[in-house]
Amino acid sequence: METRDTLVPIGDDLSVEVRRIRHQNSQGPTLVFLHESLGSIALWRRFPERLAKAAGLDALIYNRLGYGASSDEPLPRPYDYQDREGATVLPRLLDELGIDEVVLIGHSDGGSIALIAAGALGERVRGLVTMAAHIYADHLTIDGILEMIGRYRDTDLRDKLHRYHGPRTDELFRAWHEVWLDEGFDAALDFRHWLEAIRCPAMIIQGEVDEYGVPEQVTDIVAGIGPSARAQFMPDTGHSPHLEKPEELLDLVCDFLLRETALKTEISC
């Protein structure tokens, strides 16, 4: 496999930092990884590389606007920032890179964006995997954000995030919690019309002890998508399965790709 980092222009004087993992003779869709609100390319750790190798598929990981070397994002974040990312920015990026078919893999905010993109991209999406996605702000989400604000102020959390986000750390942290705690955001957060448009096989994952989301996030997403989706709860797992239980998650996603998508002849899990 070959790994290469680059900046990709997507129009409107904007550029997105991407990492591409490519096989010499890869066929089939590209795995596209969508990070959380405090995440980045680096914070996926080795999971994308390991899954790409196991599946024999190319992978694309990118930093959203405002992260890493990507262009700045407009702040404060608008209520529809996830819709814009999934329905506008990601399709532009895929078009610029000449990537047609994809399997979307998203965590937390990235999971919600993956749901939107799956609805927007239609038949280009061959499969969908979300971890800790949300379609509304529940009491665990809000309580978890408030607890994180305290940790950011009172512990070394800021220093840990600074290793990945550098001078943007305070700005990103503020952008994340300010929009989620805005009273108008909860009323504006409604992804049901995107769920109804998803036709691909989907695995909706959440840790059984996820501190940022109630189990109904999963069951409501699955109900909104319909028969092509299934729920997967991971025991003894919190908000970040790819960091807490990478081996188990790798097995789950490989099994999903082999059993529930039409990619059986194209992957090597």
Image (cartoon, rainbow, N blue to C red):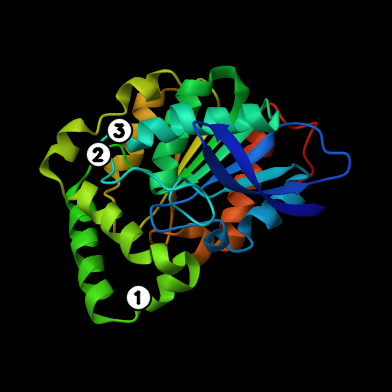
Q: Which mark is residue 157?
A: 1
- The amino acid type of the residue labelled 3 equals Asp
Query: Helix, strand, or loop for circle 1?
Result: helix
Q: Are marks 3 and 1 in contact (CB under 8 Å)?
A: no
In this orientation, which residue lies closer to the viewer: 140 or 79? 79
Front label number (1 vs 2): 1
CA gap, disc 1 and disc 2: 26 Å
* Horizontal side of residue 40 vs 80, given as left or right: right
Q: Residue at x 31, y 28 (%)?
A: 191
Per the rendering, the mark at residue 71 is none
Which is nearer the eye, 17 or 205? 17
**Label 3 crowd (10 A; few <14 / some 14-19 / many >=20):** few
Q: Quick check: 197 above or below 56?
A: above
* Tag of residue 136: 2
* Residue 7 image point, x, y percent: 63, 47
Q: Mark 3 or mark 1, which has the lower sequence index? A: 3
The residue pinned by badge 3 equals 80
